[in-house]
Image (cartoon, helix red, strand yellow):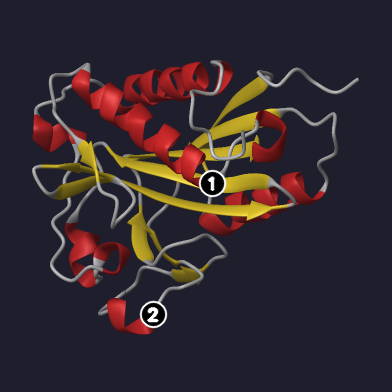
Amino acid sequence: MTPAPDTLLVDYLGQLTQPDAWQRMRDYTDNRDADTPDALWVCEHPPVFTLGQAGRAQHVHDVGDIPLVSTDRGGQVTYHGPGQILVYTLIDLRRRGMGIRDMVSLLENSVIDLLASHDVTAVARSDAPGVYVDGAKIAALGLRVRRGCSYHGLALNADIDLAPFARIDPCGYRDMAVTRTQDQGIGTATAQLAEQLVANITSALTSPCPDGCSNR
């Protein structure tokens, strides 16, 4: 029996290397069928720079001793490390009647709503996917869609060390400022923020698709 469109599994995976998480996502997507439930995987990575499909080497200045991994997600270069909340979104977009833009907006709005609940005003930008506070990027997005299903997802800076971002042009933008929830006066523990963010994403995914979903 095909699962209901609102079926969603949530797994908290702890710390995984980026290559391990990436391989698991590809395997999950490649082995999906009509009965495979959608899933959110929550984790963090040891320090790593990742370069998206459109990534350009000119945006990477000095990786030092941090690995640089080329991936199949969209976007340019970013940094992942401890204290960053990663939510990987393994979603059958076709089954949910969603397009890629719908998914991006859903993730952005989930972060914006989370920050608003902590009295921090954040916005999305049409020219640069992600979430920003006073012009500084606090959350990055990068997705891949294969066989109608998404993987990769969202990275929210909580209490991550921001210094490595100075070694790159974050998301391909020179001199882009980055920030984190800790610097915005949010003292909530990272694990609790992750649960709140997952609750927002889950609620959005299991609600009826709002008017304007691109595939409806």
Please give the residue where the numbered disc 1 appears in the rendered image: 100
The N terminus appears in which quarter of the rendering?
top right
Splitting the image into 4 quarters, where does residue 106 fall?
top left
**Circle 2: is it few (<14), some (14-19), or many (20+) Cα within 10 Å?**
few
Asked if 139 appears above or below 213 in the picture, the reply is: below
Residue visible at 42% across and 63% down in the picture: 75
Place of residue 20 in the rendered image (x, y in percent of width and height, measured from the top left): 61, 53
Place of residue 61 in the rendered image (x, y in percent of width and height, measured from the top left): 25, 80
- In the rendered structure, the answer to whether residue 59 lies left or right of residue 10 reads left
Asked if 167 appears above or below 206 in the picture, the reply is: below
Q: Which residue appears farthest toward the bottom when viewing the image?
A: 58
Place of residue 25 in the rendered image (x, y in percent of width and height, measured from the top left): 66, 48
Residue visible at 35% across and 45% down in the picture: 82
Splitting the image into 4 quarters, where does residue 83 fall?
top left
Gap in angstroms between the C-alphas marked 2 and 1: 23 Å
The earlier-in-sequence mark between 2 and 1 is: 2
Residue type, numbered disc 2: Arg
Asked if 175 appears above or below 91 in the picture, the reply is: below
- In the rendered structure, the answer to whether residue 93 lies left or right of residue 194 reads right
Q: Which residue appears farthest toward the right when viewing the image?
A: 1
- 2 or 1: mark nearer the eye: 1
Residue visible at 59% across and 49% down in the picture: 21
Please give the residue where the numbered disc 2 appears in the rendered image: 56
Asked if 79 appears above or below 192 in the picture, the reply is: below
- Identify the secondary structure beneath mark 1: helix
Residue type, numbered disc 1: Ile
